[in-house]
Amino acid sequence: MSDFIISACSTADLSKEHFEKRDIKYICFHYELDGVQYPDDLGETIPFDKFYKAMTDGAETKTSQINEAEFTEYFEPFLKEGKDIIHFCLSSGITGVVNSANIAKNMLKEKYPDRKSYIVDSLAASSGFGLLMDKMADLRDEGKSIDEIYHWAEDNKLKLHHWFFTSDLTFFVKGGRVSKTAGFVGGILNICPLLNVSFEGKLIPRYKIRGKKKVIQATFEKMQEHAQDGKDYSGKCYISQSACYEDAKALADLIEEYFPKLNGKVEINNIGTTIGSHTGPGTVALFFWGDERVD
């Protein structure tokens, strides 16, 4: 047993089984569906298919981050047990949750001065955040200390790539990420934007691609271009998707065929309810280790 815990926000979009198997603790974001608040608890309260069906049927969604009181209540039992904490937050380019975690950490420091707590801005999202967490669990299991894990994360987190596309612009328009005019034209021309997460942890539209087949190919080509060791990539690869498993599987098939040294099969997860409230259904996101994100 290690003398510290590894922790994440539920927005790392792994399955509950994955979190438990790797002994990664998590705290849940919240979302609203037609004015009723629910925890973003990995599809436990509302299964993902029902959540995305509700969005398609016109349900209104809102999200709220974890506040400092919730973090304090979550962190304290670990500190009471004599455990140190390293907690990873959803990217500061998307949410201010890292500030709430740091406030809680500083408040608890006075009460537990002998305990060590690290808060890490992951600059990652969805199962890219999850892929980072999986690596942290590997390092812990190799016997690395909490300090070594913290420094490894800070030194390497920008080597984690996120590339994603959507075949349904409805919710990007609704959330203001795409203008109504661009959304209308994009719908007519069957435009699927290809986006990534920048070095600042922000979602940035990079390319406009016509047609789903072409955007799946373009996403795959980004992994060819950026993956660590090129065709000899031997890391793990995760995909997350929102109610479009077949599109995710088509991308996974291309990757598994091209990268013979891949560590296991491509793991396909669901985009959780916090991220999914903004993307809506029809989004596929690809995550892998590669060269450093510089823009």
Image (cartoon, rainbow, N blue to C red):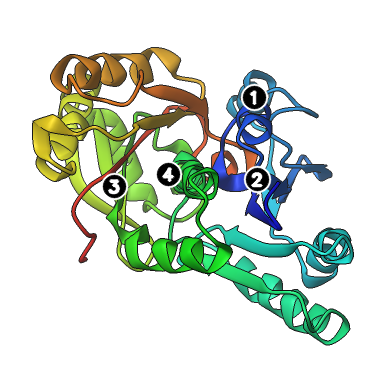
Q: Which residue is mark 4?
A: 128
Tag 4 and tag 1, C-beta contact below 8 Å? no
> Do the residues under discs 4 and 2 have CB atoms within 8 angstroms?
no
Dot 4: element: helix
Lower sequence index among marks 4 and 2: 2
Mark closer to the observer (3, 4) = 4
Q: Name the quadrant containing residue 272.
A: top right
Reading the chain from its start, which is encountered first: label 4 or label 1? 1
Is mark 3 in CB contact (under 8 Å) with mark 4? no
Residue in view at x 60 percent, y 26 percent: 52
Residue type highlighted by circle 1:
Phe
Residue 202 lies, in percent from the top left, at 39, 62
**Residue, disc 1:** 48
- Nearer the N terminus, badge 3 or badge 1? 1
Q: CA distance from mark 3 to mark 4?
A: 14 Å
Query: Of the residues under marks 3 and 2, which one precedes in the sequence?
Result: 2
Q: Quadrant of the C terminus?
A: bottom left
For label 3, the residue is 195
Q: CA distance from mark 4 to mark 2?
A: 12 Å
